[in-house]
Amino acid sequence: MASGFDSALGFSGRRGPVAVVAKVVVYTIVVAIFAGPLLALMVGAFTRVPDPTSLSLTSGEFTLDNFTRAFDRGVLGYLANSFIVVGGGLLLQIAVSVSAAYSLARKKFPLMKLVFLLILSTMMLPEEVLAIPLSLVLSEVNLTGSLLGMIVPVGAWAFSILVMTEFMKEIPVELEEAARLDGAGDLRVFWSVVLPLCRPALGVIGIFGFTMIWDQYLLPLLVATDAQQFTLPLALRTLRSDEEVGVGVLLAASLLALLPSVLAFLAMQRQFMRGLTSGAVKG
């Protein structure tokens, strides 16, 4: 990894103190660009920041007051709403993705290519284009003003379906045929043979799906009719517009919004990396 990174920066084959100094400078700049905002977020969340324009890594003293004030503003309730939405939405999305992918990868039916094209076309439509039609549909089926209205629309995601479909196509058909010779039906073959082999792909769609649902802003904005139904990303905008909320409280709430995505990646990183590299080692 280091040699590849050096080659990309033009350092390979160079020796001497000048090259070492150049590497240190470039690496420091790269780390500062990517880690600087995160470090500032963590420091600001745990220190008193009286002046938003003077935020620095050495400002203020350590305190948990920012989190206490954030909890008083109902951040824990917003966080709970986010976990309910991402939990229900991700389970529904995985169930829909693996079912649709198995049909597309193994079954033959009329207009199959058209169905695949329609699924693919949904990835080309921005959320803003779908906002008004989606709002009207949710209103017609009485899903506005409830967390269920935030869960159902994210239950089907073209990206997850396509990833699972392409992965299932790589699974040898002979494994399924052997299971059918032993008397297994379609459901048993899918559950006991195909699905266990799809763990790497499940890790990929799990992480991407979690991040996609967790970061939703427009959908909760369309569905929520009361502040008690806000998810944490939507509540951050409310906190930002509240003049009585200091920047330290906002940073503390932002840190709470960031941690679940990081923890989800750490929990599923092994399957995620296997899913990303599985296609490179086939054949």
Image: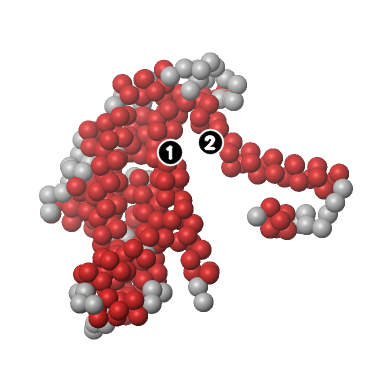
In this view, the residue in front, 278 or 207, is 278
Q: In the image, what residue occupies the spot 34% across and 55% down?
A: 127
Pick the residue in front: 24 or 132: 24
User: Pointers 1 and 2 in contact (CB under 8 A)?
Assistant: yes
Residue 187, image x, y percentages: 21, 69
Vertical relation: 89 (above or below) 168: above
In percent of width and height, residue 185 lies at 20, 74
Q: Residue at x 53, y 70 (%)?
A: 281
Mark nearer the N terminus (1 vs 2): 2
176 lies left or right of 49? left
Amino acid carrying mark 2 in the image: Leu
Which mark is on residue 283? Answer: none
Residue shown at 45%/56% (left/top)?
Answer: 272
- Quadrant in which the N terminus is drawn: bottom right
Judge from the rendering whether residue 3 lies leftward or rightward of residue 105; answer left or right: right
Disc 2 residue crowd, few under 14, some 14–19, many 20+, Cα 10 Å = some
Figure check: 210 above or below 231:
below
The structure residue drawn at horizontal position 19% and vertical position 47%, both measured from the top left corner, is 148
Residue under circle 1?
258
Q: Farthest residue toward the right?
A: 16
Residue 48: image location, x then y, percent: 49, 18
The image quadrant of residue 181 is bottom left
Instruction: Determine which quarter of the picture holds residue 56.
Output: top right
Q: Is residue 121 visible?
A: no
Q: CA distance from mark 1 to mark 2?
A: 10 Å
Toward the viewer: 156 or 180? 180
**Residue 87 rendering spot, x and y as whole percentages:** 28, 46
**Which residue position is annotated with label 2?**
38
